[in-house]
Image (tube, rainbow, N blue to C red):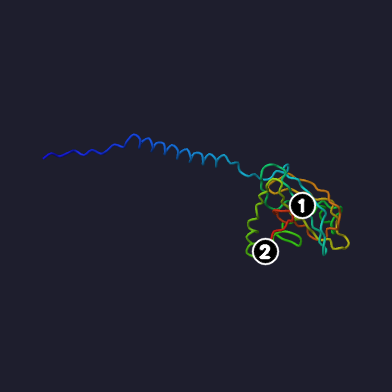
Amino acid sequence: MLVKEIRPRRPSRILVLAVLIAAVVAGGVVFALRSSRAAAPPIKQCALRSLKISLPSSGAGLGHIAYDIKLRNTSRLSCTLSGYPKVVAPLTREVPNRGPKVARASDQLSGYSGGIYGSTKLVKAYGRHLPVVLLRPRRYASFVVEYGDMVRAGCPKLTRFVVTLPRGGRSETFSLPVRGDLCTELVVHPILSGVTGFLDAQ
């Protein structure tokens, strides 16, 4: 009885070539995707030189003075802003009882004229993680600085704000018309998207 040896068939050259081409193409696609991801530049924090800062006339009501400071991206690239600006206000004379000649704004999530409002849960969440504003070209962000000006003797007068953007931005000085005396604490609200300095967290 003859036993016929069965040998495994070798893959055809065409099949091998097709497999190799598919592997090369797949590898090229993966490499291209990885390269495109690696080549995408990260979105940087807005530099002061790329922002146009405007300070409209103040708003007043019920013994409050509020300034809505607007930041417009004048560059061709998107950038980000987040946090509380540092605001210092030199005073024309000392606060009673030999107080300081400079008022430093306290961070406040929401206040009479601006900041973040809404449900308790969302406001608490924003309090832990302030919103990051993606500022596209020609778009605006803003924040509100406010204080009380209830008329009484001995309140120091404001002359200007010295504002430093969060994360070590350079300082910028704004001259302000005097609309009232600084009779309560000076506060600043976080930077928010848009021109109102207000966010309704619903």
Instruction: Please give the residue where the numbered disc 2 appears in the rendered image.
Output: 118
Q: Is residue 150 left or right of residue 45?
A: right
Residue at (80% x, 51% y) in the render: 55
Q: Amino acid at mark 2?
A: Gly
Q: Outermost residue, front direction?
A: 14
- Residue 8, percent from left and from top: 25, 39
Tag 1's secondary structure?
Answer: strand
* Placement of 136 over or under 59, stated as above or below: above
**Quadrant in which the C terminus is drawn:** bottom right
Quick check: 19 left or right of 33? left
**Dot 1 surroundings within 10 Å: few (below 14), some, or many (20 or more)?**
many
> Which numbered disc covers residue 96?
none
Q: Residue at x 67, y 43 (%)?
A: 77
In the image, taking residue 20 as reference, residue 94 lies left or right, namely right
Q: Earlier in the sequence, mark 1 or mark 2?
A: 1
Q: Residue 104, how many percent across, how many down?
A: 77, 54
Query: Identity of the amino acid at label 1?
Result: Ile
